[in-house]
Image (spheres, helix red, strand yellow):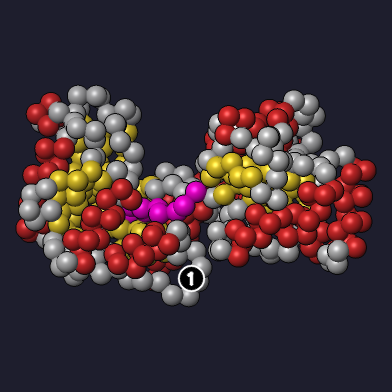
Amino acid sequence: MRELLGELTKRWRAGESVGLGTVVATFRSAPRPPGAAMMVGSDGCAYGSVSGGCVEGAVYDLAQAVAASGRPILQRYGVSDDDAFAVGLTCGGILDVYVEKVDRQSFPELGGIADDVEAGRPVAVATVVAHPNRSWVGRRLVIRPDETARVDSTVGSARADEAVRDDALGLLAAGHSATLTYGPDGERRGAGMRVFVSVFAPKPRMLVFGAIDFAAALARAGTFLGYHVTVCDARPVFATRSRFPDADAVVVDWPHRYLAGENAAGRIDARTVVAVLTHDPKFDVPLLEVALRIPHLAYVGAMGSRRTHDDRSKRLREKGLSEAELARLCSPIGLDLGARTPEETAISIAAEIVARRWGGSGRHLTDTAGPIHESPHVPAVMSAESRESSASR
């Protein structure tokens, strides 16, 4: 829905009622992912797409009917339907489309959600798309990671709100939209309630300092993991777009000045990771002094030998950093994989970042016991029962 949010919010603010169809689940070779949406305005104009052209006509008609009736519908399109070829879904896939009426009365939270997205603040919207009790369908819960006591609206009960919010926070952290299933009152075991969690999360940031070959490999790994990657170096001859084609941004600036400026501007959050690959005191000591004093950074790692690490730590102590601040530094950077090449080293660093994010030990799983996933937030598309089972394996 993100690509429609501007037009949708404009019509919402004007008091217009529209029909909105959202892909909430896909199977096999469905052409669009969960979250893809199509809006039909009161003037008959259509925006967006749910299937890349396959079932747009059918969803268009259904959206107009729902906008008129106000009664939401969860519709499945696929080759098992008698009219699959009539609506054009010939790719062999299946998709579930939730169609609803959106206006100020049915979706009063939309303005605040749009403000969050515009400001780059993460927010998730959980909507009940199926339930044995028809009155629950269409109820919403708005989830923001910085709110622990207050929530907007409800999916139907305090128990269901708690379960949905817990799982939605995991999806929000991962940046994935998904349909989750529960028992009728949010039970972890059971079925009957389906909730689509639409996630509006900016990509987490990876800041790589030092325009070297290891940085190019790490930029590729970071992009693969879903980060918005910035490579920064004070030397313009090295910090070039041609050397870092996989980075989202290449910045020529003194590293410590750039990081301090980004933090002051509010563009650093608790998902941001910092990799210092310069291993040159004149660059990395001032940079690490800034980084280690930003308490909410998810990860700070620095490349260098153990001798370099000892010298760097001494210099940082002389700058007044506390032992608690120094303890946040991952140095030498990465997990012990025996890496040699830039690509292997990038995997080592990426693995350490993932381990820090989810609380992993970095050990061989064959050498561990107990649950594999310690985090209660499992960003996967599965039933609540399946999520619980996977956490206990």
Is residue 20 among what the camera can see?
A: yes
Q: Is residue 275 above or below residue 83?
A: below
Across and down, in percent, residue 160 comes to 38, 64
In the image, 160: left or right of 250?
A: left
Is residue 156 among what the camera can see?
A: no
Magenta stretch: residue 201 in it?
yes
Label 1 amino acid?
Glu
Of residues 314 and 363, the one nearer the viewer is 314
Quadrant for the C terminus, please.
top right
In the image, 316: left or right of 104?
A: right
- Residue plotted at (87% across, 47% down): 309
Q: Is residue 148 above or below residue 92?
A: below
What is the magenta range?
190-203
In the image, 38: left or right of 258?
A: left
Across and down, in percent, residue 38 comes to 21, 46
- Residue plotted at (11% across, 37% down): 57
Magenta stretch: residue 193 in it?
yes
Which residue in the structure is indicated by mark 1? Answer: 147
Q: Is residue 51 above or below residue 173?
A: above
Of residues 116 and 125, the one nearer the viewer is 116
Of residues 43 and 60, the one nearer the viewer is 43
Quadrant of residue 292 within the rendered picture: bottom right
What kind of element bears circle 1? loop
- Residue plotted at (18% across, 70% down): 105
